[in-house]
Image (cartoon, rainbow, N blue to C red):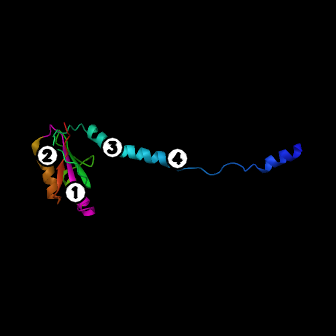
Amino acid sequence: MAADLSSSSQSDDIGPISAINVTPFVDVVLVLLVIFMITAPVLMKDSFGIHLPKASSADHQSFPSIGVVVTRQGQILINGELASFEAVSAQVKQALAKNPETRALISADGDARHADVVKAIDLVKSAGMEHFAIQIEKP
């Protein structure tokens, strides 16, 4: 009888597991992706040292947008990258070609010169974009 038990336990042995369950890995990666998507805009604003002006009448609308930043030193960044005036116009035209509903979101440091902000608005409008918004912070 002892021989029968040992032979039956050997026949129940399936072998090594050769499949990997990737579902938990995908879940973790998607959660990290969402976290990075939420924190990236906040980190980008802080990394450039932009201090937005405060206003109590902020409007919360969601549109496809292209980000234009005017720094305190008068530099213009488009979607987080330093750009020349020609590059701003080209990227705005490219964004409008992809989606005509695209709007410019202009963020300017509170200490930026008014002339630099007006230049950024002029670049966006001269590239064909009629709708833009000025980004502010609520007090």
Give how far apart the Cα atoms at labels 3 and 1 are. Answer: 21 Å
In terms of secondary structure, where does tag 3 sit? Answer: helix
- Which numbered circle lies on residue 123? none
- In depth, the one of 132 and 55 nearer the eye is 55
Q: Secondary structure at mark 2?
A: helix
Circle number at residue 40 = 3
> Which region shows up in magenta?
94-112
Look at 43% across and 45% down and name the residue there.
31
Where residue 137 appears, as percent x and y from the top left, is 20, 40
Instruction: From the viewer's side, name the closer residue of 56 and 95.
Output: 56
Mark 2: give few (<14), some (14-19) or many (20+) Cα within 10 Å: many
**Residue 51 rendering spot, x and y as whole percentages:** 20, 37
Q: CA distance from mark 2 to mark 1?
A: 16 Å
Alpha carbons under labels 3 and 2: distance apart: 24 Å
Q: Earlier in the sequence, mark 4 or mark 3?
A: 4
Q: Residues within 10 Å of mark 3 (few under 14, many from 20)?
A: few
Numbered disc in front, either 2 or 4: 4
Looking at numbered disc 2 in the image, what kind of residue is underneath it?
Answer: Val
Location of mark 2 (residue): 117
Residue 102 is covered by the magenta coloring: yes
Residue in view at x 33 percent, y 43 percent: 40
- Quadrant into which the C terminus falls: top left
Mark 4 and mark 1: span between their CA atoms?
Answer: 40 Å
Say which element carries label 1: helix
**Structural crowding at the residue carrying mark 4, measured as other residues with C-alpha within 10 Å and reported as few (<14), some (14–19) or many (≥20):** few
Magenta-span inclusion, residue 52:
no
Circle nearer the viewer, 4 or 3: 4
Q: Is residue 120 above or below residue 137?
A: below
Please name the amino acid that badge 3 sits on.
Ala
Q: Quick one: label 3 or label 1, which is nearer the N terminus? A: 3
Label 4 secondary element: helix
